[in-house]
Amino acid sequence: MNTPLSLARFFLSLLFIILLTPVLTMGQRLHPKLKEAKPGGDKLVINRVVVLPAQVSLTKDGMKGSEPLEKEAAAATPIIENAVAKALTAKKLTVLDSHFTPEALQNDEKLKYAAADLRRNYDELLAKVTKKQKDVEKGRFSLGDQVLLLNQDDNIDAFIFVNAAGQRKSGGKKALGWMMLDPSMILPTYFIKIGIIDARTGDALAYTQVRTTYDIGKEDDKKLVDILAGTLKKLPSGTPAEKK
Amino acid sequence: MYKHSQCPSLCNRLSLRLITALLSCFVLAGLATAQTGQESFSFGEVDLELLEQVKQQDKRFEDQGLVYREPQMNAYVDRLGRSLLKPEDQLENIVWRFRVMRDPVVNAFAMPNGSIYVHTGLLARMENEAQLVGVLAHEIIHVRNRHTYLSYRSYRKKMLAINLIGLAGAYTGMGGWGASMVAQFMLGISVIGYTRELEKEADLEGAQLMAASPYDPKAMVAAFESFLHKYEVDLHGEPFYGDHPKTKDRVAYLNEWISKSAPKRETESAGLSKEDYLKNASEVTRHDIQLAIDAGLYRTATTLGKRLVAAQPELASNLTALADAYAALGPRSPEPLAEEKTGQGKKEARKRRNKLTLQEEERTLAATPAGKERQTANYAEAEKFYNRATQLESNYALAWRGLGELYEKQSRPQQSVEAYSKYLELQPAAMDRLMILRRVRAQESKTATNEKTDK
């Protein structure tokens, strides 16, 4: 009689602990050709990367439901992109200036469409990747050679796709959370997913995701850089970009 | 003093009463909003906040390359939308903008700041101008009657009720918890129900708007009826109780209004020519075909391509678009087969779509004898249309690129190299130059291997 109750209590406690964990890296998956990479060796080594415009969505969860935070998301986007760039630089990768920012694409409709289509296809693929993350290690996922549309000078090794979704809590919701002892109503939650795509073949080279309760939104966010560096721990370090 | 065992039941009764009282208050408040909302609208703090968020969203669509910028099509949609506006539609915090969104899904939507977006998928699906005007009329009513603000206000009230009821439920026994769940469910349903009411209002007032214009409101009905015709296997179907009324119901109440209340038309209705509309929409349809192919909507792409070719059979761009669709269709039939429409068929298709990538799905289908047969037939159709395009316009580069891709798929490396080379010769500065050059190299090495094997 007691076993189901104990089990339920155990799982509830586990859930409670998970919800309270400030940073939770949920898998770092590498493509086989990257897994065996060695600087100076035959296998693939990523050196030059471009961080594509991040897809960031933020909402505020309050007593009166969820509301979009479009302005805050727009403000958080460069912060997240910079943090990803810094985390990659820490892995000795050269992060090139992106030619795919909205400002840069303003006068090039074709390239803007190509970037948008690639992002759409990536998001489509991401849904499959998140379901079967382990298959990244089997080299199962690819966007195809259409990635070359954004790599016309052939000087980019990989594109970095970032998706971030966050939920902030209003004061009322936090109070409700305390009354109901539900940490999911108290703490902000952010999910950040990073996909590294071969800029020549379109193969998904690496995928990692992290959940954090740390509130993102500060300029030059050192803590965020540390979190992201932690999620990219398994990624092989690059070699200086000049040796391309 | 109560006996210990009596307390929970009293608590439950109290909480039940509390839950019922809260539920009644909020439902009545919601109804009050629904009834008074349309007459006069004054902006509150929450509405202005929402407006700011929406403006930002508008900018995001633009920044992310989701807006179709082709000037002619945009001018066309804008002209049609503005033709329905009256001087009194210059309302506070509304800047009317009619825009096209690059999305193959058949849809349109309105934002409370006056931005109305029509998907390329809808533009490609409409049969004439009047049908498109019908959709625009519906969206204009959403903006004019401030539907987004009203439904957001209603949603906030109901969510507050849901949260408070949830709290009350958490502090009571099973009875209170059960009652709170039922109450929350009912409130959830009423959020959807209110949105449905607003949709119906937009339909009926939109039809009235059309009736007062040179366009016939019957075209709105025809537009909705066209949504019922699915080009793809409908994997999800209409929800049992969604935020829009069921399409069949919309058609029925609109027809009823037209037969009973619509004013008799004395002049001929405008915008009914299919040919004129297709000419106006041919470029956006070709663009949508590429988007549909990218999204795995191969049958939609093929049907739209056929429609283009039927309207303008001597246009190389149309023939190429249809050929692209056939090449992408691969091992699938151009229309859903009877077995795909059954429950089991849909289940399998859903499973495939959820589990497999588009490339894997194609390989799986092509591995079956029927798939192989269909693939051969579709590739043959594609080749026929590409060839026809190059015969009509030998310098039409995209047809050569398509041929190159097709031959690559058919393992005909030498012909693939020739077609790709022709493409690069015609468009030496093409954006996909590097991609094509790499493919050429790969095909050339295949040819060399084949020759070695032959020797």
Image: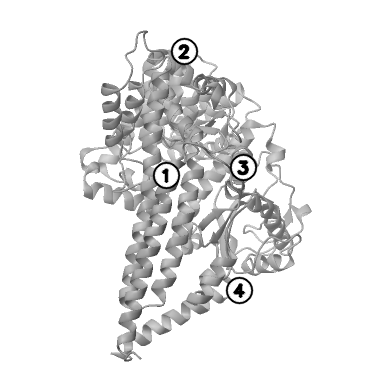
- Picture disc at residue B392: 2
> B299 left or right of B140?
left
Callout 3: SS: helix
> For the residues tagged 3 and 1, is the chain the same?
yes
Residue A235 position, x and y percent, is: 63, 65
| Co-location on one chain, circles 2 and 1 | yes
Q: Which of labels 1 and 4 is toward the front?
A: 1
Q: Which residue is mark 1?
A: B34
Spatial CA span between label 1 and label 4: 43 Å
Label 1–label 4 contact, CB within 8 A: no
Give the distance between the C-alpha atoms of the residues marked 3 and 4, in whole angstroms. 30 Å
Q: Nearer the viewer, residue B414 or A173?
A: A173
Query: Is residue A39 in view from this perspective?
Result: yes
In this picture, is B70 found above or below A65?
A: above
Q: How is the image coloured?
A: one colour
Q: Is residue B251 left or right of residue B455?
A: left
**Circle 4 residue:** A22
Whether callout 1 and callout 4 share a subunit is answered no
Q: Give the number of the mark in front: 3 or 1.
A: 1
Please state if B448 lies on the left or on the right of B345 as rendered.
Answer: right
Give the chain letter at badge 3. Answer: B
Q: Quadrant of residue B134?
A: top left
User: Where does residue B64 sit, x and y in percent of width and height?
Assistant: 61, 41
Residue B60 is marked as 3
Q: Position of residue B255 (x, y in %)?
A: 27, 26
Q: Amino acid at mark 3?
A: Arg
| Marks 2/1: CA–CA distance | 59 Å
